[in-house]
Amino acid sequence: MTEEYSVVLTDLIKKLDLRNYTPEIDTDKVFITDPDINRPALQLAGFFEHFDTARVQICGNVENAYLADMHTREENIEIFDKLFSFPIPCLVFCRDIEPYDFIIEAGLKHGIPILSSKSTTSSFVHETVRWLHEELAPRISVHAVLLDVFGEGVLIMGDSGIGKSEAALELIKRGHRLVADDVVEIKKISDEQLIGTSPAITRHFIELRGIGIIDVKTMYGVECVKTSQQIDLVLKLEEWDKDANYDRLGLEDSYVEFLGNKVTSHNIPIRPGRNMAIIVESAAVNHRQKKMGYNAAQELYNRVTQNMINKK
């Protein structure tokens, strides 16, 4: 089940190092729920149809020049009085532009924070949209372990006690990096990208039955942990069943779906003597090869087919 999320305006101010011209307004009580932005050029011209009031409003050189040349001060005051009558989260001026006094006064009157950034407008828009899309992304939590293995985000799933954490610990000792153990928060950044993170309370910890909690960052160093990772591959660990029909070639990929996004998935049977760390490494490298256009199973199939043709 997904939830709706919001970002406190104070966090945006700190993240993007914004100057606040209306400190009297409590930005801890202002929430952003829309990851997109709006440049209010049409609104400054008096057109408010289809105005998306939930978005951060951004003004650059063009909007500032329009205010200076196209309206009298009285007309501008009237425009901003109407603009701020809508419940917008804030108005940000880029390129270190200082807002006019009447804009600050209107902001204070309506409780709309007025901010400024030193960044160029395009850079600020890009970074704001990127950060808000990540913070406001739909998300779910799953019981799994997430690691960075040779640059591939590998999500290891399976029943409790099947050996996910033990496999993760062996991979960490082999130089790979832990992102999350036990609970993985998955965010849908786009239709192509899922990002996995760890809840802050369990970040960098691993639970080993019979031993207890291990702090990976302290024990193995900061080079063995990450805070987030794109999910590229899912490995589902399951008890070995001699009667089950396991995939032995890998010609056809299987998928698991999170938040509407499909991720390549493999079922890995567990039995005594199998080295799970090597299996996970091999799966990660094989997945990378497929993304680069080489499929070992397809290559074997082509060789067998060609051999049969040659024998005719």
Image: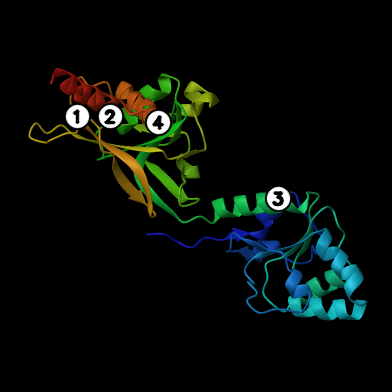
User: Which image quadrant is residue 104 in?
Assistant: bottom right
Q: Earlier in the sequence, mark 1 or mark 2?
A: 1
Q: Which residue is mark 1?
A: 248
Residue 166, how many percent across, how many down? 32, 27
In this rendered view, identify the residue nearer to me: 231 or 228.
Answer: 231
Q: CA distance from mark 2 to mark 4?
A: 11 Å
| Position of residue 136 measured from the top left corner of the image (x, y, whole percent) | 54, 56
Could you classify mark 4 by the number of other residues whose Cα lies within 10 Å: few (under 14), some (14-19), or many (20 or more)?
few
Q: Amino acid at mark 4?
A: Gly
Q: In 3D space, how far apart are the residues under numbered discs 3 and 1 (Cα atoms)?
A: 52 Å
Residue ID for mark 2: 298
- Cα separation, mark 3 vs mark 2, equals 51 Å
Amino acid beneath label 2: Gln
State which tag comes first along the sequence, 3 or 4: 3
Above or below residue 197? Residue 136 is below
Pick the residue in front: 5 or 47: 47
Q: Of the residues under marks 3 and 1, which one precedes in the sequence?
A: 3
Q: Which residue is mark 4?
A: 293
The residue pinned by badge 3 equals 14
